[in-house]
Image (tube, coloured by chain):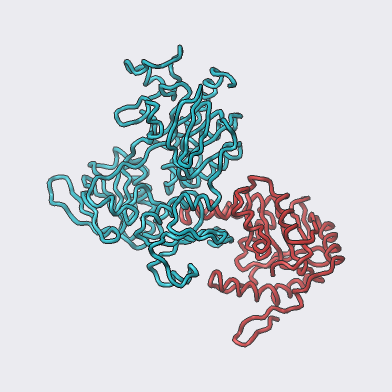
Amino acid sequence: MEALAPGGVLVPSPEFGVLATDERIAAAAEALERNGFRALVVDTGQEARFQVRELLPDGAEVFNNTSRTLESIGIAEDIERSGRYQALRLRLYQMDREMQRREMRVLAAAPEYVVGSVHAVTDDGSILIASASGSQLGPLVSGAAHVILVIGGQKIVADLETGLRRIREYCYPMEDERARRVYRVPSGVNNVLIISRVLVPQRVTAILVKEQLGF
Amino acid sequence: MFDYDARPVTPQVIVAGTHASAAAYAIRDFLTRNGQPYDWVDVEQSGAELLLHVEKIDVSRLPLCVLPDGTRLEAATVEQVATGLGMVSAPQLAEYDLTIAGAGPAGLAAALYAASEGLTTVIVEAVAPGGQAGTTSMIENYLGFPEGVSGNELATRAAAQARRFGAEILLARDLIGISSDGVGYVSTLSDGTMVRGRALLIATGVEWRRLEASGIDRLLGAGVYYGAGPSEAMACTGSSVVIVGGGNSAGQAALRFSRYARLVTVLVRGETLAASMSQYLIERIAGVSNIVVRTGTQVVGAEGDSRLRELVVATDGGNPSERLPADALFIAIGGIPRTEAAGPLELIHDEGGYLMTGTDLASAQGLLGGWPLERQPLPLETNLPGLFAAGDVRHASIKRCSAAIGEGAMAVALVHRRLAEVGSG
């Protein structure tokens, strides 16, 4: 379980922050392909950013999930600030919180494109994503027409069990610290999505990056 | 859905100033109407220095804007902020088939239909897409939106739709002049940009009529605002808000502010709302407990120190004037047409300044003395060939969003006829 430092602060377990070898990343990409994902492997975060630009058509409606990965390599900025896309977060921001609540929920639930990241990828090609609120999981499963996931190379794990352990012992402490700082509320591993097979061809693109990105 | 899903994750503009600053209000209003998220820092509140990462705030250099890239704009203006955010672009073409002045409902509709039918199209707009309708909190009687749609949302969708078909929208500069140029017209913007169009549609709408009462001008932006003040709703939480006007804009503003303010008082000069406001709004307002409508009442003065504190109002029937505590006053008392830029062209207008078009021109004796063509002016065409008017700026227009949209769409068909007449240039 999570390690507690003095004062009750959770300490991320360092074993899950290690970048996988190129061979292991390539093997994970092949496994993802076998499971119906479109898998791409790139060397750097900037190449991933370029790849996302290639995948998103101009004018597309895009929701960017909250993600350190997307923020750190400029993808969140591209989506929200470049003017190339209909950034759904900006559109939702403009809407009336009370009178358009239902419309906002519908829009957020079914974006044309969702761009996000994951918390773990298993060697046999499953992905795991945890969420405190769960609000961003629905579009990943089926709501969004297209899903693009940018994944740092340190997130590859042996199996689902290790993936769950990575979420609890590594991602959660860091996300909890972020949530307390940004939202002033604790985080929680309240919802975990596992995608082991994608049935709609080309719907989910996983970009594996040979760099350490995000949590 | 959670509220943090409806916020950008990247850094946003920070606007810092005092609540009594008209310059800060202009920036907040511009950003709000353009759907640009921002964080407002009131420098009179404790902790402002910390939020702005400075030891001491130079109050002589406010408002201060910090852009997402870290650029700090002191004594910032709307133009500087718009430029800093990359919202100011140059026209892509040397000449367009159609220039549209104004990105309200009429202008946006014309841009959409013109661009979708293959006309090269550009809109010039001083503030934001949406015009007066864009500041409306909820339009409930617009076709196809059974649960209503906010003016801002409608404008955002329309602008995206028009851009998707290739229309350009040049924002954040005033249109300061229009002149004839062969068969077409040249529009000059406040930064010197010139836009040449073979046809021109004036869809500049109206601006709010000024309220003639003592103290109003001094407190403008410091508690006194023209229009529905979409950027101010949250700031009115728990306060006492007064809205002057009896039209739909005033009614919609009352409903918006009633969700934040402790009390909303609507002051109407006439004896009833029925003459000027849609029935559905009258019924909505009647069902909200913290909205009070006072008919036969007008503002004769506004008083305050650095910001508005109270209003002096007079009622019909010769009663002595009364003092009404007010934290904010929103003035929505009808409009005056925006046609200054076209002044030198001597367009024919009615007594109120609204542009005369089509059969209204042809049927009025003596108005068309200088008309150069054998044919009569087309519907929506002014007394200058190829120069059209649509929406609220036009004489005898129906002052409704859907009517303006209809006129914008109709104008495009007429522009086609005009362009066929003058050839491919």
Residue depicted at x 58% and y 40%: B163
Q: Which image quadrant is residue B402 in?
A: top left
Residue depicted at x 41% and y 61%: B61
Residue depicted at x 30% and y 31%: B352
Identify by letter the chain in cyan.
B
Q: Is B391 placed above or below B128 here? A: above
Q: Nearer the viewer, residue A82 or B298?
A: A82
Q: Is residue B228 visible?
A: yes
x, y percentage for residue B41? 44, 64
Residue depicted at x 40% and y 21%: B383
x, y percentage for residue B403? 43, 33
Is residue A212 rendered to the left or right of residue B242? right
Q: Nearer the viewer, residue B193 or A99?
A: B193
Q: How many marks?
A: 0
x, y percentage for residue A43? 79, 61
Is residue A59 rendered to the left or right of residue A38? left
Q: Quadrant of the C terminus of chain A?
A: bottom right
x, y percentage for residue B289? 32, 56
Q: Quadrant of the N terminus of chain A?
A: bottom right
Q: Is B333 placed above or below A186 here? A: above
Q: Is residue B289 visible?
A: no
Identify by letter the chain in red.
A
Is residue B376 rendered to the left or right of residue A153? left
Q: Is B301 placed above or below A158 here? A: above
- Residue pushed farthest top? B374
Q: Which image quadrant is residue B174 in?
A: top left
- Residue pushed farthest bottom? A6
Q: Which image quadrant is residue A150 in?
A: bottom right
